[in-house]
Amino acid sequence: MTQMSVYLGSAKKNAFFMKKLGLGFFLFVPLAIFAVAALLHQEPENTDVSDNSSTTSVLSVVEAQRPKTCEERQDGQPSASLKGHDVWKYLCAHKEDVYTVSSGDTFAKLLSERGLSSSQAHEASQAVRRLWDTRELKVGQDVHFLYSLEGKAALKGLYLLSDPTHLVLLKRTGQDFTADLISVPSTTTMVYKESRITSSLFDAANQSGVPTNILIDMIRAFSYDVDFQREVKEGNTFSVFYETVQDNNKKVLSSRNIAYASMRLNDRFLRIYAHKTKDGSTVFYFRDGSSTRKALLKTPVDGVRISSTFGMRMHPILGYSKMHKGIDFAAPRGTPIRAAGNGRVVYMGRFGAYGNYLKIKHNDTFATAYAHIHNFPKGMRVGQTVKQGQLVAFIGTTGRSTGPHLHYEILKNGAQVNPQSVKLPTSEKLSSAEMKRFRQTVAKVEMQMAAQGKMDTAQLVQNR
Ligand SMILES: [Zn+2]
């Protein structure tokens, strides 16, 4: 019987085809053709199938969403080459051998190791490269090599996931190689997660199943307003409503596009909504239509690293005072420091007790300073312009410092001011026409959440 292994994407946890589904997944297109026959006869006649043992799973797959045809697809791929071509039938007609890419492998090397001459390997690579950059082959990624059902004599082709919802199929016909990009049948679902913080924001996200990339996006969106070092406390809650792409087996292929997020902190409740403005950019706004974007970030550090443990807070995390005219963020050495706002680097280098020090001038009024830096990313220099959120340095403990942390200062007209209370220039407001559209965005998202019966409980309290 044919060994059909799980297809794992570049990330192992994004397992893509379930093992138990096995060959069945690739059978359902040809089988859809036989679906009527399957209802009439218990066992559809299917000469392409090497393993007919699991009629039940095959039927359940047939019932599941069928893959999109070329005509139904929005992305224009894989073009005319697939029209009328039954790729699934092709896969079913082959045996496969799954190889997990390890360090040092290249696409051409994998082909050579399976008996292709260097010119054949080159031709095959060229065919694939038109659809996918073979240099993107990643360690841990699975490549499915195809052989004829009779034996393993000669390589007949291969396929791999080029992204969570597409696979590249390389086929060999005699000495010729052709490649196709195949859309993986998937559905998009909105998911709501709500969590109470017990040990740390990171742990809470983990326990409630919020993917790390969603947590990162959420923290970034709140980084203008929330001081993740001092403000997030035990008992606080957060919620996030985002999109997941799932295969027919409900396996999540990817998570993306936060539509709504909230944070219930000790003394305030923040709700942000993603809104696509007329110019096409997606920006987070508070419910009243004010942008979350501020001139300066309140947490100018990778918030996930700060949020990963309260243990880091054993280090004295100082607030602003007459003696200490800055705010400290404790995080492991090497944690990225991000430019608090758009500006220009006016100082970088040793600066007394500050150790390695960076100063960014944002406008005529405001500048920010970053101290005890471990080192700077390559290419950073005085005079260069930086964008808000851009990586500008790494946390260290240089100068007069007792452990790895960032000492962050906001300077207004040259004097340090309290970052926690400084009044920053107001963020852009929506125009009245855009505001009208934003109200619709809010209504739609809140309805979607309510429809799931999973309205943010903090929000319910707020709306009462
Ligand atoms: Zn400090």
Image (cartoon, rainbow, N blue to C red):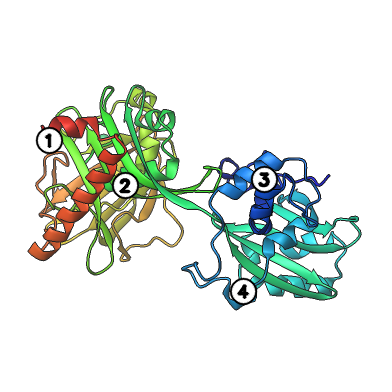
**Mark closer to the observer (3, 1):** 3
Residue type at mark 2: give it: Arg
Q: Quadrant of residue 133?
A: bottom right
Q: Quadrant of the C terminus?
A: top left
Residue 393 placement (x, y as % from top left): 38, 50
Q: Which residue is mark 1?
A: 463
SS assignment at label 2:
helix
| Neighbourhood count class around disc 4 (C-alpha, 10 Å): few under 14, some 14–19, many 20 upward | few
- Which residue appears at 71% of the width and 42% of the height? 55
| Neighbourhood count class around disc 2 (C-alpha, 10 Å): few under 14, some 14–19, many 20 upward | many
Q: Ligand 1 is in which quadrant of the figure?
A: top left
Q: Which residue is mark 2?
A: 220
Q: Is residue 123 above or below residue 186?
A: below
**Mark closer to the observer (3, 2):** 3
| Neighbourhood count class around disc 3 (C-alpha, 10 Å): few under 14, some 14–19, many 20 upward | many
Residue 10 placement (x, y as % from top left): 60, 50
